[in-house]
Image: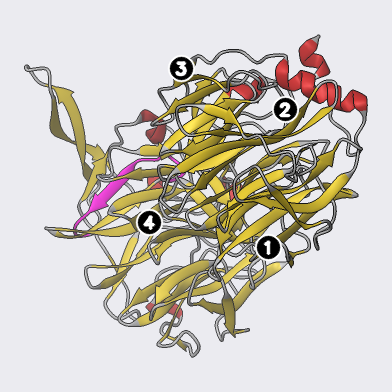
Amino acid sequence: MSQLLCLFRVAVYPCFFCFALSFFCSTAFAEEPSFSAERPERFSGRAYASLVAFQDQLWLFGGTDDSGTDSANEIWSSPDGDIWTQIQIEAPGHKAVVFQNQLWLVNGFGGSVWSSKDGLEWQSQGAIGPGFVGRGSSRLVVSISSEGDERLWLIGGANFPHKFFNDVWAFDGSQWEEVVPSDSAHSYTGRRDHQVAFFLGRLWVIGGWTEDGVFNNDVWSSIDGKEWRLETAHAEFSVRREHQVVVFNDGSGEQLWLIGGIGDGGLKDVWSSHDGTHWVLRQAETQYPFRTGHAVAVFDSQLWVVGGDDLLEYFDDVWSSRNGTDWQSHVIGTDFKGRADHQAFAFADRIWVVGGLNDEYECENDIWSSTDGLRWQRHRSHADFSPRCGHRIALFNQRLWLVGGGRRDGVYNDVWSSQDGIHWQQVVEHAPFFARKDHELVVFDQRLWVIGGRGVDESLNDVWSSVNGTDWIQETTGDSSFPARARHQAIAFNGLLWVIGGEGPDGTRLRDRHQSHIYDDVWASNDGRQWHRQPVDKLATHLTQSPNEAGSMELGRGEVPFSIWTQFGSEVVVTNETAGERLWLIGGHYGNQGWSTLDGEHWVNRNPVDSRFNDTAIEGHQVLVFDNKLWVIGGTDGEFFNGYIWNSSDGRSWQKLEAWVVAD
């Protein structure tokens, strides 16, 4: 019953029942900590958590989620705000702070104090001490003297039944004491849901909810915690509570930064101040939704906002900003979406994925990239070019070039170029060649080449080249080329242009492949004009592994039938080895095996060790070389579109990566 009560929310405006319920939810399950390690996939949406930077990581402590108590006993850490690791801790209600090079947890209700040098092993540091009255919504801050000595301060808060405190407690690392002002000293008004900071050698108390039921925008400061000075009764920002304040340097010097809160409705503004008294509006509305109970910290020279709630929903999102106005989302644990007929390539030390067909059979024009294949950033939901599938992209003269593609309403013969992969310019609206998709775009002999593809009504076998991506010359006509085809593979290999397999003139869609003519041939050309069919050995070397007498695995060789026809829908890529260039043919409708050759005639079957990879027949995927590995990204088995990402250093042992979207 007690946990169900905690599902109720504290209203925007103060009331006695809401305060009592908030107090109950924070104290009902306050117990002494016990520690164990777990690693779930992500933290749940939550509010009223603590966020600190410690040992080059972000640390997230506790909070309240939609279960009322579940998140209150968790600690999470992250080196980058993207990938988080959980350390389980049963210590509800604790607030976190970094003090004397350690993490400290302080339970304002029970008064218990814990510390840790690494966030894993925790030691009890006793309690705050005699005279301290348990409370919620108190605030912690660390001060540093001119000699470098640190002190931990606990300031204000409130408890049931509705007492608002204006006391100050200080801790030097060994002993707590109440800082008692003299009879003539001024003190800030008792309050809760306020914020505190240490800035310009002074303690600061900013805004919050006072006992008269009023939200405030006053600012107080003190040099010693005893004598408090009212800096302004009404700052430039509006009255509020549950806001966040941190000290942050955006490049113009350290300032106080105030973010969001609740006032006359929800607030998502950002303010800063050089002196604590005069405040400047930096952003009226942030890109992220309104929230209260959010956690804010400074880490990696950025402001970070994590979680919170909008009084209806708890958030699990993460946002960062280097200037307090431009915010980047770090979406946690979202799947990288499946697709086929896209383009994937390596560029500027990243893997890129552009456009393609989604699981609703709609073409996209989004742009994604990743440095490791795990964490993906969506740069554009809608690029400068129109949505398309079956397009082709190549790197030429230090720029990316996109040619053609199509969607339900037709096919294109436009040409686009980009210097950064994100921003694209159209360089040719209508090239002299027929509009097409499922063609090939290759760099060979210091030129871009467009080869074959599927036009409006027919498959094509023409070959075009360009020295600049703008001016195009037709290199073949009629019988000088190979038979018309689409969904073939073309690549520069061993000083020649190669065309491998493909789908004949009567194949119209991937789902109609059983009606298509699938080619079982390999063609090569040294100039792109005259093409010659190449011999292909019908028996390929088959690599196997079997245990020897010693029990270890031993590499063996055999022979298996080989046909380009059986590899329909595969993708090709070239790697460099000591023996020379190696051509790889990976995936396809009839099996996800890997084949390779040093000469185009004699092939080796690199039977994958991982049966999950071997048993997953895919086409419409992409293959590339990145970070000295082979990568397979996306594709379809004819029924489902997957977001699979695999990599391999040898073409036999494949690792499956679970991709996350970390920025959107």
Report the span colored magenta: 588-599
Are discs 3 and 2 less than 8 Å apart at CB?
A: no
How far apart marks 3 and 1 lie (CA) works out to 40 Å
Amino acid marked by disc 3: Ser
Tell me, for residue 272, which label it has, or none.
1
Amino acid marked by disc 4: Leu
**In-image side of 52 versus 240 (left or right):** left
Tell me, for residue 104, which label it has, or none.
none
Q: Label 2 belongs to which residue? A: 136
Where residue 454 sits, quadrant-wise, is: bottom right
Outermost residue on the top side: it is 1
The residue lying at 55 percent from left, 48 percent from top is 662
Magenta-drawn stretch contains 595: yes
Q: Label 3 belongs to which residue? A: 36
Label 1: element kind: strand
Are discs 3 and 4 less than 8 Å apart at CB?
A: no
Disc with the residue nearer the chain's start (3 vs 2): 3
Label 4: element kind: strand
